[in-house]
């Protein structure tokens, strides 16, 4: 679980900014808390704020850092990720730090990156217990020509010394020490458990953005129990869908109806070249959710379809409303939540009715009782800002300041009574993080304003 995330010099976050999931002393909504090794940790965190306040930038900062750990430096773009309002922003490092709990242990892991060189400048991992212990600290020598790795742990044998020497050269600035050691170290050596604990924690982090599509749905439908539960939840949220299934489709016909002939041929050739026999891939085409698998050297496709009561005329994903399509992306969260981990959602309320958003969150807490799972989301839906629904320490605000940097702060700092009308106070501007509309006058213009129609 996540205890704290700190970021500095990433997009609108100029100065060091902290977001915490440590629970306060509030006793209400005890089911929103997980207690691990004597620490109370929040299972939910919800960020409110005006448009362009920086809410999405926080989720993007988390995803940027997680992607580096999981997939390496080449998996991200460093272009324009720094605080661009400051002329010196590009020259300053971006800093990302996670305080987390994994496998019953508390760790603090982080790194600093150079935006100009697209390299790691410094990296560290500490185990936090009765006393703080440095698992490793990787930093440049005073002359800046090489890295050195230090540790408080007395590792057996020469293995760790070899790992550290491998990272001596500055050319290793594009490689994450944590990831490298976690994957290379023997599983039976206890001294390397911290590396594996933190590495595995990052594998359990998931992100959902407004443009995300859940690529796991075709596989989910192959399991009878999961398919039934998925269909039940779609009915529960009043989508009109009675059941969901897959049907075989003509892949060539599908491609040529969606793309130009040239693009269709190129995509098919690419999939024939890269997709191994017996494996599958998700293809994002206008029709909807398409799964392509390679069997006996040939590509075969199936499409996710839904019955609205007439099994002879099934609906494609493109036929569904925006809200229903959003639920297709969100509902698999419940299954992921039962497996543990952290789920970040940007704009959880997008295209959803107010009551659907609230019910989705309520059901998350209900479904994850006894499971160390967290849901952290941005939202504009102020109706959920209700202390009968959320705890004070679960509500966070993101505000754009005069210098265009973002700051984050918790409702908990206002020490409001449990019976306070939080939403009304928020709309009145008591907590900040609301739009500020400046004086505006419409100049006369006799020319007709035109709008281009979209397809």
Image (cartoon, rainbow, N blue to C red):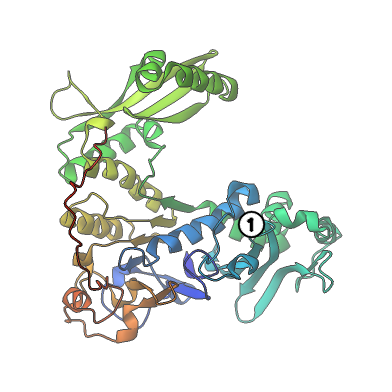
Q: Answer yes or no: is residue 104 visible.
A: no
Expressed as whole percent of the image width and height from the top left, the position of residue 417 reads 21, 85
Q: Is residue 97 above or below residue 203?
A: below
Q: Is residue 392 left or right of residue 163?
A: left
Label 1 crowd bin: few (<14), some (14–19), many (20+), radius 10 Å: many
As rendered, which of 13 and 330 lies closer to the eye? Answer: 13
As rendered, which of 274 and 3 lies closer to the eye? Answer: 274
Secondary structure at numbered mark 1: helix
Q: Answer yes or no: is residue 377 visible.
A: yes
Q: Residue furthest front?
A: 446
Q: Is residue 248 above or below residue 433?
A: above
Numbered marks: total: 1
Expressed as whole percent of the image width and height from the top left, the position of residue 251 reads 40, 16
Quarter placement of the C terminus: top left
Q: Quadrant of residue 178?
A: bottom right
Q: Is residue 446 left or right of residue 74?
A: left
Q: Is residue 449 left or right of residue 120?
A: left
Expressed as whole percent of the image width and height from the top left, the position of residue 15 reads 52, 76
Expressed as whole percent of the image width and height from the top left, the position of residue 382 reads 22, 66
As rendered, which of 379 and 166 lies closer to the eye? Answer: 379
Q: Look at mark 1 in the image and give the residue it sits on.
A: 196
Q: Is residue 62 left or right of residue 371?
A: right
Q: Quadrant of residue 313?
A: top left
As rendered, which of 144 and 185 lies closer to the eye? Answer: 144
């Amino acid at each position: 679980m996540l205890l704290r995330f700190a970021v500095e010099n990433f997009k609108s976050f100029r100065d060091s900014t902290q977001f915490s999931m440590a629970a306060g002393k509030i006793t209400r909504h005890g089911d929103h808390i997980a207690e691990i090794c004597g620490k109370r940790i929040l299972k939910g965190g919800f960020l409110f704020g005006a448009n362009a306040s920086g809410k999405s930038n926080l989720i993007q900062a988390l995803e940027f850092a997680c992607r580096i750990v999981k997939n390496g430096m080449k998996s991200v773009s460093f272009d324009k990720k720094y605080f661009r309002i400051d002329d010196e922003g590009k020259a300053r490092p971006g800093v990302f730090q996670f305080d987390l709990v994994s496998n019953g242990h508390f760790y603090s892991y982080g790194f600093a990156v150079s935006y100009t060189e697209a390299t790691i400048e410094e990296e560290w991992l500490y185990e936090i217990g009765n006393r703080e212990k440095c698992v490793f600290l990787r930093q440049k020598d005073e002359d800046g020509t090489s890295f050195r790795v230090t540790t408080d742990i007395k590792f057996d044998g020469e293995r760790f010394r070899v790992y550290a020497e491998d990272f001596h050269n500055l050319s290793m600035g594009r490689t994450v020490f944590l990831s490298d050691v976690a994957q290379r170290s023997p599983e039976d050596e206890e001294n390397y458990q911290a590396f594996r604990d933190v590495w595995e924690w990052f594998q359990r982090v998931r992100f959902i953005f407004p443009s995300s599509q859940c690529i796991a749905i075709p596989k989910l439908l192959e399991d009878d129990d999961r398919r039934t539960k998925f269909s039940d939840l779609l009915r529960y949220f009043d989508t009109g869908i009675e059941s969901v299934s897959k049907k075989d489709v003509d892949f060539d016909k599908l491609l040529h109806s969606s793309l130009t002939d040239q693009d269709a041929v190129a995509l098919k050739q690419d999939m024939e070249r890269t997709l191994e026999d017996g494996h599958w891939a998700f293809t994002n085409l206008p029709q909807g959710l398409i799964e392509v698998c390679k069997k006996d050297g040939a590509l075969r496709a199936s499409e996710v379809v839904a019955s609205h009561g007439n099994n002879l005329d099934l609906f494609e994903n493109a036929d569904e409303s925006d809200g229903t399509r959003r639920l297709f992306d969100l509902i698999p969260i419940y299954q992921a939540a039962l497996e543990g981990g952290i789920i970040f959602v940007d704009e959880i309320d997008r295209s959803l009715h107010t009551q659907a958003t609230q019910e989705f969150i309520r059901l998350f807490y209900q479904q994850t009782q006894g499971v160390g799972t967290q849901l952290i989301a941005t939202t504009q839906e102020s109706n959920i800002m209700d202390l009968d629904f959320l705890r004070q320490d679960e509500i966070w605000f993101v505000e754009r300041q005069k210098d265009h940097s973002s700051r984050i702060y918790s409702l908990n700092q206002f020490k409001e009574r449990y019976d306070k009308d939080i939403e009304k106070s928020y709309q009145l501007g008591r907590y900040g993080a609301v739009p500020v509309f400046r004086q505006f006058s419409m100049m006369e213009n006799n020319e007709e304003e035109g709008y281009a129609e979209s397809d």
